[in-house]
């Protein structure tokens, strides 16, 4: 019948009434109450007790402690290179002259220089003629020949910050004990220097007992004893130098480094001939990187005197560049032996080299520095092989030497202020405070 059907726009028969504000008796779900998990009701909730929706009828979950994550082992902080520098500078118990700095050079790689050769002021305040390096280039510090701080290996025997349990004061005691056990500490070093000085003073100034090279003037015993003194100090100086060495025992020397390939090759050939004739002499041959002529011996008491010596050489460099005197050219023409234990090459008479040596001595004396003088210091020589005095049994050098008309030449164009001791640079030469080109 018309008028008895569903009203227009009304709900269809059997349909559930929609909730709304105008629908009385229909309740909405209260906000904030989670509905049961429909996946749990279906029997497949994969979250279990971690599900956000409630699981009706499920047993209460036992609270589980959070899993223990492995705690990463944190390394103790390591003292920086700046801390080590400050300790060496301000701790009166540490001798700065006994330390060596291994630093990264942009051109030659890692090289070693004495700690006292650097200016440790702010880099912005130093001039262009001052040796200074950024602290981030420092790779390690050495006390004598022992590494006490190494950035790459996280070694810190200065403060013991990396857990090694050793400090620099303990290192000093250990090294002093090693020297006493070896018989080279304190008086042994001074005694060796005094003995060589006495030997040089008693020797004849003309070089009696030395076999002169052909056409050469010969080298006096005093000149060879100066080399003896330098090398005995080097062999006796351990990683812990004596607190007050005698002024007659040199700590530094000014040298002309042998860089001529021709001369080096000739020396290497003679050393090979010596080794073939007597293999026991091989250990006494002078290494090719350390070949040099000593011009002057110095005793420098501390960093101030070392800086004064460097200043003297820089003044000499400026004077040479202003006047441009002719560079001495050394011509080595033969070999000679001394007392059957020293094989050397004589450069022959060189007034220019003698004048340069006297200029150095006068310059150092004006600065108040101690110059170690010995007889025969005007006679220069290049040691090829040297057997230490008093060694028993002592291998002997051959009395008959092969003829050598010309060994090679070396121009004196640069000077090196070297430190006496066992320390060596990465290229094998002595630790150098400064190396200056004269021209």
Image (tube, rainbow, N blue to C red):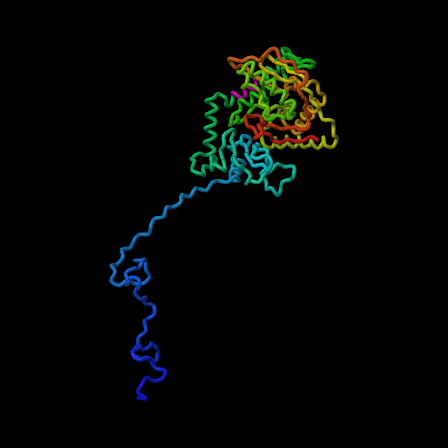
**Image-quadrant location for residue 28:** bottom left
**In which quadrant will I find the N terminus?**
bottom left
Q: Is residue 232 left or right of residue 204?
A: left
Tell me, yes or no, whether the highlighted magenta stretch contains residue 61: no
Up/down of 428 relative to 7, above or below: above
Up/down of 67 relative to 203, above or below: below
Up/down of 227 relative to 427, above or below: above
Where residue 157 appears, x then y in whole percent?
Answer: 47, 34
Determine the residue positioned at 47% across, 26% down. 176
Q: Where are the magenta residues, as a range?
A: 188-194
Specify the principal SS of the magenta part: helix
Where residue 417 appears, x then y in whole percent?
Answer: 62, 28
Residue 84 visible from this viewpoint: yes
Up/down of 339 relative to 413, above or below: above
Where residue 215 appears, x then y in whole percent?
Answer: 70, 14
Residue 255 visible from this viewpoint: no
**Image-quadrant location for residue 308:** top right
**In which quadrant will I find the C terminus?**
top right
């Amino acid at each position: 019948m018309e008028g008895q059907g569903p009203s227009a726009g009304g709900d269809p028969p059997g349909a559930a009434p929609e909730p709304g504000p105008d629908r009385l008796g229909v309740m909405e779900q209260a906000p904030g109450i989670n509905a049961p998990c429909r996946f749990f009701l279906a029997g497949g909730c994969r979250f279990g007790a971690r599900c956000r929706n409630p699981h009706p009828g499920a047993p209460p979950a036992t609270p589980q402690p959070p899993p223990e994550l492995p705690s990463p082992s944190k390394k103790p902080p390591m003292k920086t290179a700046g801390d080590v520098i400050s300790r060496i500078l301000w701790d009166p118990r540490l001798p700065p002259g006994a330390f060596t700095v291994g630093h990264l050079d942009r051109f030659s790689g890692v090289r070693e220089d004495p700690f006292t050769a650097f200016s440790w002021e702010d880099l912005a305040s130093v001039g262009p003629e001052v040796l200074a390096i950024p602290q981030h280039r420092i790779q390690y510090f050495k006390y004598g020949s022992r590494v006490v701080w190494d950035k790459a290996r996280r070694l810190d025997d200065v403060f013991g910050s990396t857990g090694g349990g050793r400090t620099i004061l303990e290192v000093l005691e250990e090294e002093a004990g090693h020297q006493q056990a070896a018989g080279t500490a304190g008086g042994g070093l001074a005694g060796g220097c005094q003995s060589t000085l006495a030997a040089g003073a008693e020797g004849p100034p003309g070089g009696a007992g030395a076999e002169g090279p052909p056409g050469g003037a010969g080298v006096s015993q005093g000149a060879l004893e100066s080399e003896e003194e330098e090398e005995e100090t080097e062999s006796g100086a351990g990683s812990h130098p004596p607190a007050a060495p005698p002024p007659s025992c040199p700590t530094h020397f000014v040298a002309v480094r042998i860089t001529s390939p021709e001369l080096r090759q000739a020396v290497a050939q003679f050393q090979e001939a010596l080794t073939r004739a007597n293999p026991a002499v091989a250990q006494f041959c002078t290494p090719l990187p350390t070949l040099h002529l000593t011009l002057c011996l110095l005793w420098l008491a501390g960093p101030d005197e070392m800086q004064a010596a460097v200043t003297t050489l820089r003044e000499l460099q400026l004077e040479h560049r202003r006047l441009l005197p002719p560079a001495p050219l050394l011509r080595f023409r033969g070999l000679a032996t001394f007392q059957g234990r020293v094989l050397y090459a004589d450069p022959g008479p060189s007034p220019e080299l003698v004048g340069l040596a006297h200029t150095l001595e006068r310059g150092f004396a004006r600065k108040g520095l101690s110059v170690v003088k010995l007889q025969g210091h005007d006679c220069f020589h290049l040691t090829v092989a040297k057997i230490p005095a008093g060694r028993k049994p002592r291998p002997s050098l051959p009395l008959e030497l092969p003829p050598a008309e010309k060994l090679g030449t070396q121009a004196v164009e640069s000077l090196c202020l070297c430190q006496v001791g066992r320390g060596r640079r990465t290229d094998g030469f002595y630790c150098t405070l400064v190396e200056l080109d004269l021209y």
